[in-house]
Amino acid sequence: MDVTILTKTKAEAVQEAGLLVSSDDNTKQLLPADTIIVSTGAICNQALYQQLSGKVAEIYRVGDCAEPQRMLEATAEGFLASQTI
């Protein structure tokens, strides 16, 4: 099986013949495909935590607010935080 891994590339459209992508220099390319898997990086989003911090009695960061992680770990963190409330 041939697999193509692209970085710094944006998916533009899924078409009948494959996936239309564009690179950082705006070059567009149609990648022939019958199966497409999208894997993107993960980042922490702490915006709401920062807005509420200091304005509420208790606040906990869990899941991707604390650090990018898998669903199982995020759910476990949420459960543990709920036990301390």
Image (cartoon, rainbow, N blue to C red):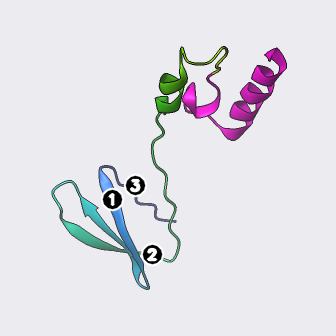
Q: Quadrant of residue 71?
A: top right
As for residue 79 lying within the magenta part, the answer is yes
Q: Is residue 8 left or right of residue 72?
A: left
Marked residue nearer the N-terminal end (3 or 1): 3
Give the vertical position of 27 relative to 70 (above or below): below
Q: In the rendered structure, which amino acid carries the disc numbered 2?
A: Ala
Left of 40 or right of it: where is 82? right
Circle 3 is placed at which residue position?
Answer: 5
> Could you tell me which secondary element the residue under label 3 belongs to?
loop
Picture layout, residue 25 above or below residue 68: below
Q: In the rendered view, would you say 32 is above or below 59? A: below
Q: Residue at x 40, y 54 (%)?
A: 5
Q: Which residues, given as a range, are shown in magenta?
A: 61-85
Q: Residue at x 46, y 31 (%)?
A: 47
What residue do we see at 53% from left, 72% from top? 35
**Which residue bears the numbered disc 2?**
33
Residue 15: x, y in percent?
41, 81
Mark nearer the N terminus (2 vs 1): 1
- Which residue is located at x 75 percent, y 21 percent? 81
Give the Cα distance between marks 3 and 2: 13 Å
Which image quarter: residue 14?
bottom left
- The x and y percentages for residue 13 are 38, 73
Q: Position of residue 34 (x, y in %)?
A: 51, 77
Which mark, residue 51? none
Write down the residue under mark 1.
10
Instruction: Farthest residue to the front: give it.
Output: 55
So how many labels did they put on this image?
Answer: 3
The quarter in which the C terminus is drawn is: top right
Quarter of the image for residue 31 reads bottom left
> Can residue 7 be found in the magenta stretch?
no
Looking at marks 3 and 2 on the same chain, the residue that comes earlier in the sequence is marked by 3
Q: Is residue 46 visible?
A: yes
